[in-house]
Amino acid sequence: GFSRGNSVSLTLNAFIQWKLENNLRKAYQESRAAYAAAIIMDTRNGEILAMASLPDFDPNQGAAFSELSRINRTIATIYEPGSTFKMFSLAALSEQNLLDEETVYFCPGYFEYKGIRTGCPGNHGRLNLSRVMKKSCNAGVITATWNLPVLEFYRTLASLGFGKRTGITLPAEEKGILKNPSEWDIHLKMSIPI
């Protein structure tokens, strides 16, 4: 007999998918990168409008392509988010009512604690929190989060989904890495916020 499977609801937009694939392929070829991946999501509801990963393969001839080209790097590879993560550090500060636009941070081009130094993209001098974010100032963000209790910082990040799978119904999704608060040494206390 015939049995019904699970329902599938696609949210991909064919035009956006086509544009993403073309632009990603161009950037991939021009940069000569080992791989490239991109997702376009509707941030209001989490719908994936377009998703692409390169190198790619023809599913009609999957066996003719290497295993590496069959990896959907948008979900099967873990990335450090880089400076985009700074907004989540601000969210953790906000959760603890520690956001203060009046506080002035000083950036000498690095943040240093007990001889351990993390660089900054510039020597920004004195700046408030808005300018810290505008300049993507590592020293400012680290200073702002330095006294934030590690457990509270961790709880905010975990509640935002870091260290978990998204639950997308595609195979081979990796969960991110969010170290347990007991593992946050000085290096992590400097690197996680930025």
Image (tube, rainbow, N blue to C red):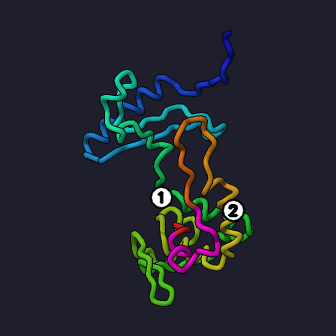
Extent of the magenta region = 178-191
- The residue positioned 40% from the left and 69% from the top of the image is 121
Compare marks 1 and 2 and give the one earlier in the sequence.
1
Task: For label 1, count other residues whose C-alpha is less than 10 Å away and answer few (under 14), some (14-19) or many (20+).
Answer: few
Q: Which amino acid does label 2 sit on?
A: Thr
Q: Which of 192 and 130 is in front in this view?
A: 192
Whether residues under marks 1 and 2 lie with C-beta atoms below 8 angstroms apart, the answer is no
Which residue corresponds to the image point at 48% horizontal and 61% vertical from the top-left?
Answer: 83
Looking at the image, residue 52 sits to the left or right of residue 48; the answer is left
Indicate yes or no whether the magenta region holds residue 179.
yes
Q: Distance between the residues labelled 1 and 2?
A: 18 Å
Residue assigned mark 2: 156
Residue 92 is a magenta residue: no
Q: Is residue 184 above or below residue 94?
A: below
Residue extending furthest toward the front: 1
Rendered view: 94 above or below 112: above
User: Tag 2, which secondary structure?
Assistant: helix
Q: Position of residue 161 (x, y in %)?
A: 65, 53
* Other-residue count near label 2 (Cα within 10 Å), few / some / many at <14 / 14–19 / ≥20: many
Residue 111 lies, in percent from the top left, at 48, 80
Of the numbered discs in the image, which one, if any, rests on residue 151? none
Q: In which quarter of the image is the N terminus?
A: top right
Residue at horizontal 38%, vertical 21%?
60
Circle 1 SS class: loop
Q: Which residue is drawn at 42% across and 40% down?
A: 71
**Residue ID for mark 1:** 80
Position of residue 26 measured from the top left corner of the image (x, y, whole percent): 30, 36
Q: Where is residue 67 in the image (x, y as percent from the top left)?
A: 36, 39
Task: Please name the amino acid that badge 1 sits on.
Answer: Glu
- Furthest-bottom residue in this view: 114
Q: Main secondary structure of the magenta part?
A: helix
Judged left or right of residue 176, residue 121 is left
